[in-house]
Protein backbone atom coordinates (compact mmCIF):
# COMPACT_ATOMS: atom_id res chain seq x y z
CA UNK A 1 0.00 0.00 0.00
CA UNK A 2 1.36 3.39 -0.96
CA UNK A 3 1.50 6.24 1.53
CA UNK A 4 -1.11 8.25 -0.36
CA UNK A 5 -3.66 5.45 0.16
CA UNK A 6 -3.10 5.16 3.91
CA UNK A 7 -5.39 6.79 6.43
CA UNK A 8 -4.08 9.39 8.84
CA UNK A 9 -3.87 6.96 11.79
CA UNK A 10 -1.51 4.69 9.84
CA UNK A 11 0.57 7.63 8.64
CA UNK A 12 0.93 9.01 12.16
CA UNK A 13 2.16 5.65 13.40
CA UNK A 14 4.85 5.77 10.72
CA UNK A 15 5.63 9.39 11.64
CA UNK A 16 6.17 8.38 15.27
CA UNK A 17 8.92 6.06 14.04
CA UNK A 18 10.53 9.03 12.20
CA UNK A 19 9.48 7.86 8.71
CA UNK A 20 10.26 10.94 6.59
CA UNK A 21 8.10 9.82 3.66
CA UNK A 22 5.11 9.52 5.97
CA UNK A 23 5.86 12.94 7.45
CA UNK A 24 6.00 14.41 3.95
CA UNK A 25 2.65 12.80 3.08
CA UNK A 26 1.04 14.28 6.22
CA UNK A 27 2.60 17.66 5.40
CA UNK A 28 1.25 17.51 1.83
CA UNK A 29 -2.25 16.74 3.10
CA UNK A 30 -2.42 19.63 5.57
CA UNK A 31 0.00 22.39 4.54
CA UNK A 32 -2.37 24.52 2.42
CA UNK A 33 -5.05 24.76 5.09
CA UNK A 34 -2.47 25.43 7.82
CA UNK A 35 -0.76 28.11 5.72
CA UNK A 36 -4.09 29.87 5.07
CA UNK A 37 -4.98 29.71 8.76
CA UNK A 38 -1.68 31.29 9.76
CA UNK A 39 -1.78 33.84 6.95
CA UNK A 40 -5.18 35.18 7.99
CA UNK A 41 -3.76 35.93 11.43
CA UNK A 42 -0.19 37.17 10.77
CA UNK A 43 -0.91 38.84 7.40
CA UNK A 44 2.55 38.08 6.05
CA UNK A 45 3.05 35.23 3.59
CA UNK A 46 6.68 34.56 4.51
CA UNK A 47 5.99 34.54 8.23
CA UNK A 48 2.89 32.38 7.71
CA UNK A 49 5.07 29.89 5.85
CA UNK A 50 7.61 29.89 8.70
CA UNK A 51 4.93 29.47 11.34
CA UNK A 52 3.33 26.64 9.39
CA UNK A 53 6.63 24.78 9.06
CA UNK A 54 7.54 25.35 12.71
CA UNK A 55 4.11 24.07 13.68
CA UNK A 56 4.59 20.89 11.65
CA UNK A 57 7.98 20.32 13.29
CA UNK A 58 6.45 20.86 16.69
CA UNK A 59 3.58 18.50 15.90
CA UNK A 60 5.90 15.76 14.63
CA UNK A 61 8.09 15.97 17.73
CA UNK A 62 5.06 15.92 20.07
CA UNK A 63 3.03 13.21 18.33
CA UNK A 64 3.18 11.05 21.45
CA UNK A 65 1.04 13.63 23.29
CA UNK A 66 -1.78 13.32 20.73
CA UNK A 67 -4.47 11.16 22.32
CA UNK A 68 -6.58 10.38 19.25
CA UNK A 69 -4.97 10.17 15.82
CA UNK A 70 -8.29 11.02 14.20
CA UNK A 71 -8.07 14.47 15.84
CA UNK A 72 -4.69 15.28 14.25
CA UNK A 73 -6.03 17.98 11.90
CA UNK A 74 -7.74 19.91 14.69
CA UNK A 75 -4.72 19.46 16.97
CA UNK A 76 -2.34 20.72 14.28
CA UNK A 77 -4.62 23.66 13.50
CA UNK A 78 -4.61 24.61 17.18
CA UNK A 79 -0.79 24.59 17.17
CA UNK A 80 -0.75 26.80 14.06
CA UNK A 81 -3.29 29.23 15.52
CA UNK A 82 -1.44 29.45 18.83
CA UNK A 83 1.90 30.05 17.09
CA UNK A 84 0.31 32.63 14.78
CA UNK A 85 -1.35 34.49 17.63
CA UNK A 86 1.91 34.45 19.58
CA UNK A 87 3.76 35.96 16.61
CA UNK A 88 0.95 38.45 15.96
CA UNK A 89 1.01 39.67 19.56
CA UNK A 90 4.81 40.03 19.55
CA UNK A 91 4.85 41.74 16.17
CA UNK A 92 2.06 44.14 17.12
CA UNK A 93 4.27 45.52 19.90
CA UNK A 94 7.02 46.49 17.49
CA UNK A 95 5.52 47.17 14.09
CA UNK A 96 2.39 48.62 12.55
CA UNK A 97 1.18 46.80 9.45
CA UNK A 98 -0.92 48.81 7.01
CA UNK A 99 -4.28 47.15 6.49
CA UNK A 100 -3.95 47.68 2.74
CA UNK A 101 -1.19 45.06 2.70
CA UNK A 102 -3.59 42.34 3.82
CA UNK A 103 -4.84 39.93 1.18
CA UNK A 104 -7.22 37.16 2.14
CA UNK A 105 -7.47 33.86 0.37
CA UNK A 106 -10.60 31.79 0.31
CA UNK A 107 -9.48 28.28 1.27
CA UNK A 108 -12.21 26.30 -0.38
CA UNK A 109 -13.76 27.81 -3.47
CA UNK A 110 -15.01 24.43 -4.70
CA UNK A 111 -18.41 25.09 -3.15
CA UNK A 112 -18.77 28.35 -5.10
CA UNK A 113 -19.79 27.91 -8.71
CA UNK A 114 -17.55 29.79 -11.11
CA UNK A 115 -20.50 31.42 -12.83
CA UNK A 116 -21.96 32.62 -9.53
CA UNK A 117 -20.23 35.99 -9.50
CA UNK A 118 -22.64 37.52 -7.02
CA UNK A 119 -21.69 35.07 -4.25
CA UNK A 120 -17.98 35.47 -4.99
CA UNK A 121 -18.33 39.25 -4.99
CA UNK A 122 -20.18 39.21 -1.66
CA UNK A 123 -17.57 36.94 -0.05
CA UNK A 124 -14.76 39.12 -1.37
CA UNK A 125 -16.54 42.24 -0.19
CA UNK A 126 -17.03 40.81 3.31
CA UNK A 127 -13.39 39.71 3.56
CA UNK A 128 -12.22 43.10 2.29
CA UNK A 129 -14.44 44.84 4.82
CA UNK A 130 -13.14 42.65 7.67
CA UNK A 131 -9.64 43.89 6.95
CA UNK A 132 -10.76 47.47 7.55
CA UNK A 133 -11.78 46.67 11.13
CA UNK A 134 -9.57 47.15 14.18
CA UNK A 135 -6.91 44.45 14.51
CA UNK A 136 -8.45 42.70 17.51
CA UNK A 137 -11.82 42.65 15.71
CA UNK A 138 -10.16 41.13 12.65
CA UNK A 139 -8.49 38.36 14.64
CA UNK A 140 -11.59 37.53 16.68
CA UNK A 141 -13.85 37.44 13.60
CA UNK A 142 -11.37 35.32 11.66
CA UNK A 143 -11.14 32.84 14.53
CA UNK A 144 -14.89 32.75 15.10
CA UNK A 145 -16.44 33.04 11.63
CA UNK A 146 -13.76 31.68 9.32
CA UNK A 147 -11.85 29.20 11.45
CA UNK A 148 -14.92 28.09 13.39
CA UNK A 149 -13.59 28.38 16.93
CA UNK A 150 -16.10 28.79 19.75
CA UNK A 151 -15.92 31.46 22.45
CA UNK A 152 -14.09 29.22 24.94
CA UNK A 153 -11.33 28.44 22.44
CA UNK A 154 -11.01 32.07 21.39
CA UNK A 155 -10.70 33.07 25.07
CA UNK A 156 -7.79 30.65 25.45
CA UNK A 157 -6.13 31.66 22.20
CA UNK A 158 -6.41 35.43 22.73
CA UNK A 159 -5.92 35.19 26.49
CA UNK A 160 -9.05 37.18 27.34
CA UNK A 161 -12.06 36.61 29.59
CA UNK A 162 -15.24 34.99 28.31
CA UNK A 163 -17.23 38.22 28.78
CA UNK A 164 -14.56 40.24 26.95
CA UNK A 165 -14.54 37.69 24.12
CA UNK A 166 -18.32 37.80 23.65
CA UNK A 167 -18.33 41.60 23.77
CA UNK A 168 -15.44 41.90 21.31
CA UNK A 169 -17.01 39.51 18.79
CA UNK A 170 -20.40 41.18 19.16
CA UNK A 171 -18.89 44.63 18.59
CA UNK A 172 -16.80 43.31 15.69
CA UNK A 173 -19.93 41.88 14.04
CA UNK A 174 -21.80 45.15 14.60
CA UNK A 175 -18.91 47.14 13.14
CA UNK A 176 -18.72 44.79 10.14
CA UNK A 177 -22.49 45.00 9.63
CA UNK A 178 -22.42 48.82 9.73
CA UNK A 179 -19.56 49.02 7.26
CA UNK A 180 -21.26 46.58 4.89
CA UNK A 181 -24.54 48.53 5.09
CA UNK A 182 -22.74 51.77 4.30
CA UNK A 183 -21.35 50.17 1.14
CA UNK A 184 -24.79 49.40 -0.25
Image: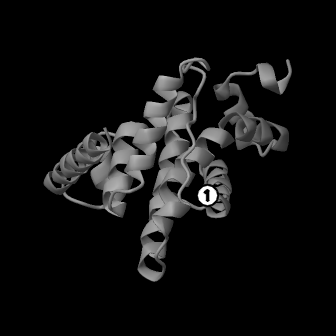
Residue carrying label 1: 48
Look at 24% across and 48% down and name the residue there.
169
Q: Position of residue 138 (x, y in %)?
A: 37, 54
Q: Is residue 50 left or right of residue 171?
A: right
Q: Quadrant of residue 72?
A: top right
Considering depth in this image, is 61 or 130 the residue closer to the camera?
Answer: 130
Look at 34% across and 42% down and name the residue there.
144
Q: Is residue 102 above or below residue 108?
A: below
Q: Tell me the element at label 1.
A: helix
Q: Position of residue 57 (x, y in %)?
A: 67, 55
Image quarter hosting the C terminus: top left
Q: Is residue 112 left or right of residue 152?
A: right
Look at 50% across and 41% down and name the residue there.
75
Q: Position of residue 41 (x, y in %)?
A: 48, 55
Q: Is residue 180 left or right of residue 110?
A: left
Look at 49% across and 37% down and name the residue there.
74
Considering depth in this image, is 161 or 96 the residue closer to the camera?
Answer: 96
Whether residue 147 is visible to the viewer of this picture, yes or no, is: no
Q: Position of residue 13 (x, y in %)?
A: 69, 34
Circle 1 crowding by C-alpha within 10 Å: few under 14, some 14–19, many from 20:
many
Image quarter hosting the N terminus: top right
Q: Is residue 87 above or below residue 76?
A: below
Amino acid sequence: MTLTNQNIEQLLQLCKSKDQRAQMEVYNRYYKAMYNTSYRIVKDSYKAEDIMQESFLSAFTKLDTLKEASMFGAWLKRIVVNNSIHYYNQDAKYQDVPLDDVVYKIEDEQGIAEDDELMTTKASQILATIKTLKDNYQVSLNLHLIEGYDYEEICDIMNISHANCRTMISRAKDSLRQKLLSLT
